[in-house]
Amino acid sequence: MKVLVAEDDAETRDYIERGLRELGHVVTTAADGRDAMFLATGEPFDAIILDRMLPVLDGMTILRSIRSAGIATPVLMLTALSRVEDRVAGLETGADDYLVKPFAFTELTARLNALSRRPAAVATETVLRAGDVEMDLLKREVRRAGQRIEVQAREFALLEQLIRNAGRVVTRTMLLERVWNFHFDPKTNIVETHISRLRSKLNAGSGRDRIQTIRGAGYLFDADA
């Protein structure tokens, strides 16, 4: 198998790389999240071993991004976080398996082999459309009525959540968890500020506001034509 190992701890990374090479696998390594993201989205791999706590970009952000981009490569997430809610969060974000450190190399390879035997996942959609708004998840582009709109990374993630739930209320708590990976209330207006910026950009050149504020509940993306 061609395997990407994204792990910032050099000793652990070398240990995994050496062991997998001895078993005949082709191994590429990354020491931080930026390199891992670049490799995961730029090259085909049969499996990815992804540390959750990578520097620059954490493993959850990488996982969320590659799944949004339609990349279905099996991901085995490594982490020192062993709580049930941590494992659930990793699996719900798109990890195929979850292994808590410290681990035995034999268990890692057994889980990797199990992932390789699974049928290939059905590719996820790479273009989202709601009303006259279109998002290309691979090119990271947003268009409204055919006109390209420049948005920042958080605004893109925010819009994706709204469009994936078009016609339904998305709460502030849901957005904090899914866009910022916050599992607590930061007691700031971070969501409101980003919604305001996103709304201004989407509405420039068009009078109709697609993002509705539902007082006391959250936000709703109006996908009606």
Image (spheres, rainbow, N blue to C red):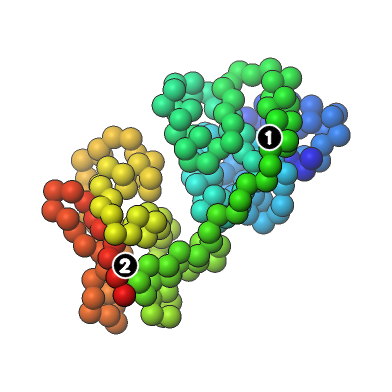
Which residue is label 2 attached to?
A: 223
Image: 198 above or below 44: below
Residue 54 seen in the current view? no
Which residue is label 1 attached to?
A: 115
**Label 2 crowding class (10 Å Cα cut-off): few <14, some 14-19, many 20+?**
some
Residue 156 at what x, y percent from top left?
41, 60
Residue 50 at what x, y percent from top left?
61, 37
Residue ID at (61%, 51%)? 122
Disc 2 is placed on an element classified as loop
Q: Quadrant of the N terminus?
A: top right
Image: 175 above or below 51: below
Q: Quadrant of the C terminus?
A: bottom left
Residue ID at (74%, 31%)? 113
**Label 1 crowding class (10 Å Cα cut-off): few <14, some 14-19, many 20+?**
some
Q: Quadrant of residue 152?
A: bottom left
Residue 164 at what x, y percent from top left?
39, 56
Residue 162 seen in the current view? yes
